[in-house]
Amino acid sequence: APIGGMSLNYNGAITESEYIDAVVNGSIKAGTAAFTGDGANDSLFLDSLPYIKAANGVAVPTIKPWKNDKALEKIKLLEEAGAMAFAMDIDSAGLINLALAGKPVSAKSVEELSELTASTKVPFIVKGVMTKEGALKALKAGAYGIVVSSHGGRVLQDAPATCACLPEIREAVGDKLKIFVDGGIRSGADVFKAIALGADAVLIGRTYVIAAFGGGAEGVELYTEKIGAELRDVMVMSGCKNLSDIMRDKIIV
């Protein structure tokens, strides 16, 4: 999942560049891809671009819900880095620290999101969707996919669990959008449940910082492989030969 601000959020135990290097390259070694972050300090976004370019674009840079003129500038930069997709975490629209830094963000209308999708051929993922209505708006705006996310539960008190929102969202959009989900996913069993409830893939955040701090790219690779091995074990025990076999009747809700 997109994480930034190592000095702010993790006391500088690892530098921004060290984290980006570890999560981008470690994820690739394990056969998946990392999201990278953004923040009030432009370097949080800019520092990721050389690593993404060196990795042939196999990463998903994330931008905050800035005014569209600034967002369009960042889209141009990630295009130049060859990013395979990009995201906007609209669930950060209420973060007070951005406003305090003099760089306010805001909610995005369908029209504003449509302008972003129309500006580029790079697939656009809207992060922070928690309702079927929100998912349908993202679809109308031309998004490639959505992330069902409450920003780690940090932006709205009493927000529902993301897993509780998944089935209704999947039913509303069918296969017209790719659906990602985050929120406390820590094991292969959690991944299995998320897929069963309607997700195509999952995002995991904070534990990747731990993996990157402890072992760099190798730590990220090993942690990702652990999640995959756990998922395969659960699939074997539940009689699922393929990911498409993972259905809601395989779990107890």
Image (cartoon, rainbow, N blue to C red):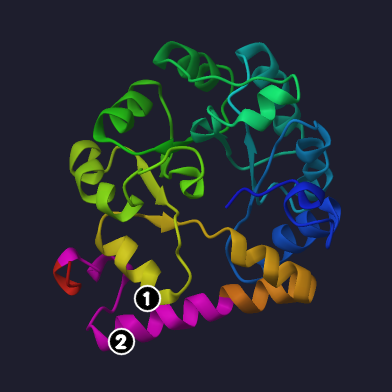
Which region of the structure is painted magenta?
225-248
Callout 1 amino acid: Ala
Q: Secondary structure at mark 1?
A: helix
Residue toward you, 187 or 105? 105
**Quarter of the rendering containing residue 106:** top right
Callout 2 amino acid: Val
In 3D space, how far apart are the residues under numbered discs 2 and 1 (Cα atoms)? 12 Å
Please state the total of marks drawn on the protein image. 2
Residue 249 in the figure: left or right of residue 200? left
Residue toward you, 141 or 102? 102
Residue under numbered circle 2 = 236
Residue at the extreme front: 157
Residue 127 in the figure: left or right of residue 214? left
Q: Does 67 lie within the magenta span?
A: no
Pointer 2 with pointer 1, Cβ within 8 A: no
The main secondary structure of the magenta stretch is helix
The spot of residue 119 in percent (x, y) is 58, 17
Q: Residues within 10 Å of mark 2 (few under 14, many from 20)?
A: few
Q: Is residue 8 above or below residue 241?
A: above
Q: Secondary structure at mark 2?
A: helix
Residue at the extreme left: 249
The spot of residue 217 in percent (x, y) is 76, 69
Q: Is residue 90 visible?
A: yes
